[in-house]
Amino acid sequence: MPRILVVENEANVRKLVRANLTASGYSVLLAADGEEGLKQARLQNADLILLDLMMPGMSGWDVLEALKARQDLQKIPVIIMTAAVKENQEDGKRANAMGAAGYLSKPFTIDELLRQVRQALKRDGDTGNAPQAHPDC
């Protein structure tokens, strides 16, 4: 069962994403901020990281940069999730340039989330054939 680390400071988004990923057959780890997310990435064996950009303290950009700088973590695919209104297109280009596997603008549908999760895991060697859930984030 693929393990997904969700790094998101908004508890309601964390819970909704966890519920839908779990219902779709994934094991889910949670982190409420960038520092905790980076620590969990080092300690756990996640197959994928869903990463919010706008968090207090260590931002998602900082976490992504730290992940990609570490040889033991740089191959874990990362999907960026953000509600950033400013220049979403520019943020998407920056995320891609920094090695992110995907980019989701909030609010996003669970179908879109699961599509990107399956795609990122397939690129990383997993089949990602999990059933879909329904509510939106």
Image (cartoon, rainbow, N blue to C red):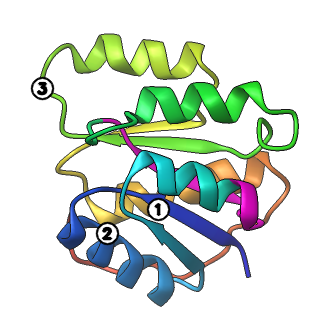
Residue tagged by mark 3? 85
Determine contact: label 2, label 1, CB under 8 Å.
Answer: yes
Q: Amino acid at mark 3?
A: Val
Residue 77: x and y in percent read 67, 44
Location of the N terminus by quadrant is bottom right
User: Which element carries disc 3, helix, strand or loop?
Assistant: loop
Residue at image location 49% in from the left, 85% down from the top: 22
Determine contact: label 2, label 3, CB under 8 Å.
Answer: no
Residue at image location 34% in from the left, 36% down from the top: 53
Residue 132: x and y in percent read 44, 78
Count of all numbered marks drawn on residues in the image:
3
The one of 5 and 57 positioned closer to us in this rendering: 57
Q: Earlier in the sequence, mark 2 or mark 3?
A: 2
Report whether 118 appears left or right of 57. right
Question: For mark 3, does the 10 Å Cα neighbourhood hold few (<14), some (14 to 19), or many (20 or more) residues?
Answer: few
Q: Earlier in the sequence, mark 2 or mark 1?
A: 1
Question: For mark 1, does the 10 Å Cα neighbourhood hold few (<14), some (14 to 19), or many (20 or more) residues?
Answer: many
Which mark, by number, is residue 14?
Answer: 2
Question: What separation in Å lies between label 2 and label 1 (alpha carbons)?
Answer: 7 Å
Report whether 111 appears left or right of 98. left
Q: Range of the magenta residues? A: 42-53
Question: What separation in Å lies between label 2 and label 3 (alpha carbons)?
Answer: 20 Å
Label 2 vs label 3, nearer the camera = 2
Q: Earlier in the sequence, mark 3 or mark 1?
A: 1
Residue tagged by mark 1? 6
Residue at image location 77% in from the left, 35% down from the top: 74
User: Which element carries disc 1, helix, strand or loop?
Assistant: strand
Q: Amino acid at mark 2?
A: Arg
User: Which element carries disc 2, helix, strand or loop?
Assistant: helix
